[in-house]
Amino acid sequence: MAKLTNPLKLLLSKLPPMPSQPPTHEARRNTLLQLAGLIGVAVLVHFQIANLSIAVFALAIFALKTTIIMGKLSIPPRLVMMVLTIASLGMVIYVYGGWNGQRAGISFLILLVALKFLESQSLRDYYIVCLLLYFLGASSFLFNSSIANIIIVIIYTVVITSILLQISNPAKVSHKDTLKTSASMIAKALPLAIILFFFFPRIQANFGFLPSFDKSNNASSLSDSLVAGEMASSAFNNELAFRVEFTGGVVPERSQMYWRAKTMPVERNFQWSVIEPEPKDFIVASKIRRLDKLKAGPWHYQILHEKSNDKYLPYLDYISGSSKGLTLPDYSVYRVRPEAGAFSYQGSSTATSSSPENIVASFAAPSDRSSLLALKSKPSAKLQRLLNQWRDGAADDAEVVERVYQYFESNPFMYSLLPPSLDENEPLNDFIFNTREGYCEHYASAFTIIMRMLEIPSRVVVGYQGGTAVNDNQYIEVRYSDAHAWSEVWVNGLWQRVDPTATISPERINYGMDALMELWESGLLGSNDTGRALANLLNPTGFSKMLNGLQDSWKNAGYQWNKWVVNYDFNTQRQLLEKLGVEHRNSVAVLVLLMASGALALLLFYFWQLVPRNIKRSETQAQYLRFVKKFKRFQLEKEASETPKEFARRAAASFPEHAIEINDITQTYYRLRYNDRAEGREASFGRLKVLVKKFKLTR
Amino acid sequence: MKKLDALFEQLNSIILGKPLATKLAVVCLLARGHLLIEDIPGVGKTTLAHALAKLFGLPYKRVQFTSDLLPTDIIGMTIFDMESKKFHFKKGPLFTSILLADEINRATPKTQSALLQAMEEQQVSVEGRQLPLNDPFFVIATQNPLEQSGTFPLPESQLDRFLMRLSLGYPGDEFEKKLLLGQNKKNDVSTVFSSEEVAAMVKQAEQIHASDAVVGYLQTLLARTRDCGQFINGLSPRAGLQWLRAAKALAYVEGRDSVLPDDIKLLASYTAAHRLHCNDGSDSTDALNELLAGVEVL
């Protein structure tokens, strides 16, 4: 019973013993304070990632430890440590609702570092703290993989390594020395790391153990629904969505560059939205994937997509081949599981969805006509009159479409980035007859609703239009500001794109969003000076041209970085290996190749060590070697073990007419090299130089 | 220097056709080293020793080593003088400046080793007393090739005490003819140096400069003998010291003020070969030459 009265004591006695203290030496206070400083910085840097309350908690623990070090106090008892640990665990669960997610993971890691640091006593503990700090450094790549971040992490690694060196060294060493050592260690390791990065076989799979992508991530993406006025705000979001490189050599016109992301068939009061694909769609998708003809198409491209948790991938209309995602019957491409970071994929496209052989057309036929005509909006009387007018006397649907399009063209519709809000009850009526001012989504939405009212199957497509060509069309940058919406109608047995925005604001389609924004900002949009302003923008002169060039180079650096480092995956590795002439059949072959070359490198290194090192020659020796070199032409070479005198004897025997010069040079050289006490060395050296220079062998 | 030239002129007129051997013998003397001449009988070993002694004006003694020779026969012994009723030490042939130990490998190891202390320390211990030897003290030992019967090979420790090992070899045709015709002047040898002059020359030879470069070359060679794996043992630091001392003396004899790598290289087979023994029992001179061919000189 006595034992039960103190269950806590019992619990503590069952704990494993504290790690034994290595007898070598103890960490110096100074070094520990440095370590503390580094942890402080690391925690502060991760502030932006971790939740504020967790960061404050970590900093509090950290401050406690600093006080302990400063005051040479002993660490808190194990009970306190246990309470702190449980509290931190509880906090993570409370704040993030569980373990899953990068933020939860990183926050936990920060807490671990702080707690381990607090608990640390022996050298071994501090080593573990350093190890955790390395891990913390690596974790920052989950959030930011820019060039700048890589440099910061390298510096951070150098500092940790330096501290590790300080801790592990029993003698007092200067910071300069350890920093130098650690920098040189990392400089030596970097080439190997780079080689391994590029050539170590990439595995084409999703790791189950990687932290899942956070739902609350603030990465930009296109909304799954189209609400009038919402997309216009993205016009000011200059964030990069993806980059495209056309690989087939054929680059479409800008007015052809419609990047489809989402197809929205469902309308509800002037708003459109996507429907999640159903199982039958996946069956069709898997059929589409099996068709070889999907590889056709004049446009082939590679897309490097920035981080996004959007399930729909943008492809150029009309898709005929894709390397990532499932191509759905509505041409959109769906991926089941979004990647954690940036990603890349290839695609190919054709200009139209038509042609009888094109299987895409057949799978894309509206299977359910009624769903593509379903409408929540009802036409007003005024609109009904117009609808009847359009319908009357039209030969076919195509003519009806043309008439509606004409209507938009001939009436004073205005393109605006800040359109007025519409009447909530009758938004369509309000837009068509009153405001007549809107962004692409207004026009796409209105046009599609009218099409459905006229019983023509239609839908809204949301994606991007155009993009910014960088470095002479080397690649195209598509930003969120390039987001666009247009309409698609089923006419003459195939889907056809109708973009009412093109008639309202041709600049948007022909010159892109950049040009449009420029016009918008200078207030010239829609005015008479539009043409001149556009000309100025498209043909920049002087300073602005240079600025554009600089911008292009910076963008290009970022592009290459993203292409070769951030998005370097199985496919890019294959591309690289193919460029290097290595047939990339499977990763086992590469692994074997890698191991073989590694073994070869080791072997070479072994033999290289046996080879006498290239000794640094003095100036005098260099002069003498110049002299020796002059005999090379006459097949007379000095053997390494031959003394200069022996060589001189041989040379003089071969070239008796030069015997005097040869002996003179040898004597002078000997005097300089082997009589280093002699006076007038500089004069002798000058003489040797002259003699060697003047020495010309003839036969 | 003129005197040295005169010395070589006389020496080479006695030992015909062996300018290198005579030069090295002089070098050995000036480097305060002992000389081992290994050759068959009758090629002029004794003549060379005799001539050197006379030319340098140094006292000279000769001991013919036989298997029954005792240490006291060379060091000397204490005898009781009946007249003075006292013991007194009768100095043996060791107390001289140039000692020719003829056919040294015929003596038993006991007698051979009696020479050890004398050669290294230039003094002998007799009945607890340290008796200094002459300065300079120069042993010229001759030995017959070991294949001959009735010989005791010199112990390694003793071999290491010889600065050089030379062999004279048969004279060339031309010189043999001269020799047979009695054209060498064996008898009218005149002393060239006084013993003070010899001491001064020895000092001067020690002052010859050896640059870092040349010492580096020597060090490389020494290191190679130790790590090339061909020899049972590499060269000792004493061997290196003696090698360099010999090189300095060679430079002095040739009238230079600094040692050249050529000196080191030339002396290799004379100062190093007899101290080295190949693992496989082959000739150490060949192995040494091979080693030299693998070391760069510049």
Image (cartoon, helix red, strand yellow):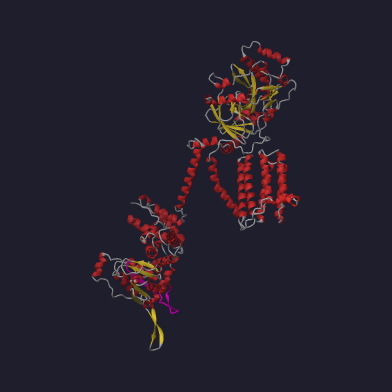
Q: Nearer the viewer, residue A529 or A146?
A: A146
User: Going by the image, does B91 lie left or right of B186?
Assistant: right
Q: Is residue A614 above or below residue A390?
A: below
Magenta segment? B121-145
Count of marks overlaid on the render: 0
Q: In the rendered image, which quarter contains the C terminus of chain B?
A: bottom left
Q: Is any atom of residue A410 visible in this view? A: no
Q: Is residue B143 above or below residue A318?
A: below
* Image spot of residue A344 (x, y percent): 58, 33
User: Going by the image, does A313 lie left or right of B181?
Assistant: right
Q: Nearer the viewer, residue A294 or A504?
A: A294
Q: Is any atom of residue B226 visible in this view? A: yes
* Image spot of residue A56 (x, y percent): 72, 45
User: Going by the image, does B125 lie left or right of A358?
Assistant: left
> Residue at the spot x=64%, y=45% of the render?
A136
Q: Nearer the viewer, residue A473 or A265?
A: A265
Furthest residue toward left: B181
Quarter of the image holding residue B60?
bottom left
Furthest residue toward top: A393
* Image spot of residue B79 (x, y percent): 39, 83
* Image spot of residue A637 (x, y percent): 37, 53
Q: In the rendered image, which quarter contains the N terminus of chain B?
A: bottom left
Q: Nearer the viewer, residue A593 or A299?
A: A593
Furthest residue toward right: A5
Q: Is residue B194 magenta?
A: no
Q: Is residue A12 above or below residue B233?
A: above
